[in-house]
Image: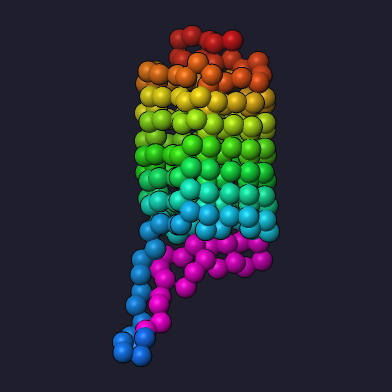
Amino acid sequence: STATTTASTTVVPETSTEAGQKATPKKKTYKITAIAPDCLGKKTKMHKLVISKNIRLIGSGAFNNCTGLRQVTLPGRLRYLGTAVFYKCSSLTTVKLPASMRSIGLNLFDSCKSLTQVSFADGIRSLPTSTFNHCQGLRTVKLPSTLTYIGKKAFYECVSLTQITIPDSVTSIHPQFFSGSDTNFTDGKTTFL
């Protein structure tokens, strides 16, 4: 079986069954642990996405340009989100990344204009280039205490973001990590204007 869609909800299943060949009439069942790059991209009528608990990796651009996607449920075992997974998912409003996460790709939420809130559990060490590029609706971001690096344009043109607390664990911030509004940045001791 593959991803199933009912009305506007898409469910990525835990397993897939392959029909047997004439020489081997038995069906084989495989555990699904990854979503391929560009797999569900440009599905404009998909509003809700439920990803099974076995998924550990989501490939680059897997859900790019899903302009109707409003809600996504990420599994607790997810470890890696590739480049531009949610690129131009312009209806997506909130995302909570699980504690199992270890790495995210470039441009993860680039141009998600309706995104207002993102919460990272501890585990992620780097916000790469353009993580929240052009997320004009972004108001709240909870950064993980494990974060050590914030990349170029990580918060570029996040005009609704008025304050962000940078964890003490951050040791490197690209000089162009932010532009486009009058946000106050706090590193626990200092406010950056």
Which residue is found at the position 39% from the left and 34% from the top?
A: 124
Q: How is the image coloured?
A: rainbow
- In this rendering, the answer to whether 54 lies above or below 173 is below
Within the magenta stretch, is there residue 52? no
Q: Point out residue 111 in the picture as x, y percentages from the top left corner.
A: 63, 38
Q: Point out residue 42 in the picture as x, y percentages from the top left corner.
A: 63, 55
Which residue is found at the position 67% from the left and 24% from the top?
A: 159
Q: Point out residue 61 in the picture as x, y percentages from the top left corner.
A: 53, 49
Q: Quadrant of the C terminus?
A: top right
How many numbered marks, from 0 up? Answer: 0
Magenta segment:
1-20
Which residue is found at the position 38% from the left and 24% from the top?
A: 148
Say left or right for 163 vs 100. right
Observer able to see residue 66: yes
- In this rendering, the answer to whether 131 lies above or below 169 is below
Classify residue 23 by image quadrant. Answer: bottom left
Observer able to see residue 50: no
Which residue is found at the position 63% from the left and 58% from the top?
A: 43
Say left or right for 34 vs 177. left
Q: Residue furthest left?
A: 24
Q: Point out residue 143 in the picture as x, y percentages from the top left corner.
A: 47, 29
